[in-house]
Image (cartoon, helix red, strand yellow):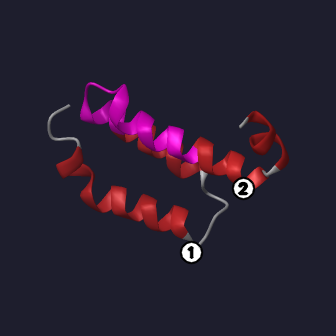
Amino acid sequence: MQEVLETQPEMSFLCGFLLKVWAVFEGPTTEAEAQAKLAELKEYAAHHEDDGYTKSISFLDEHFKHMTTYL
């Protein structure tokens, strides 16, 4: 797995992206903390435009309030 991440930059980016999505829900205990993690995710994927990454971020943005209700 490590070799794939080192030799295929897109796979490395995907892994980092998924870890940042997970971090939005895994660690924060308040909505503000989750918003900060979402902001980090947006910054991480800022150079991607009109692809699956931006669509995923748009989905998270649109449904954020419902997803973090129980933090």
| Residue to which mark 1 is pinned | 50
Quadrant holding the N terminus = top right
SS category of the residue bearing label 1:
loop
**Magenta segment:** 17-34
SS category of the residue bearing label 2:
helix
Amino acid type assigned to the residue bearing label 1 in the image:
Asp
Foreground residue, 47 or 55? 55
Figure check: 65 above or below 49: above
| Residue in the image at 70% along x and 45% along y | 12
Q: Was residue 24 drawn as part of the magenta stretch in this picture?
A: yes
| Position in image of residue 16 (x %, y %) | 61, 42
Quadrant holding the C terminus = top left
**Are there few (<14), some (14-19), or many (20+) residues within 10 Å of tag 2?**
few
Identify the residue at the far bottom of this view. Answer: 50
Of circles 2 and 1, the one toward us is: 2
Q: Is residue 4 left or right of residue 38?
A: right
| Residue to which mark 2 is pinned | 10
**Are there few (<14), some (14-19), or many (20+) residues within 10 Å of tag 1?**
few
| Position in image of residue 13 (x %, y %) | 67, 49
Q: Was residue 27 drawn as part of the magenta stretch in this picture?
A: yes
| Position in image of residue 11 (x %, y %) | 69, 51
The quadrant in which residue 51 appears is bottom right
As drawn, the label of residue 27 is none
Q: Spatial distance from mark 2 to mark 1, Cα to Cα?
A: 16 Å
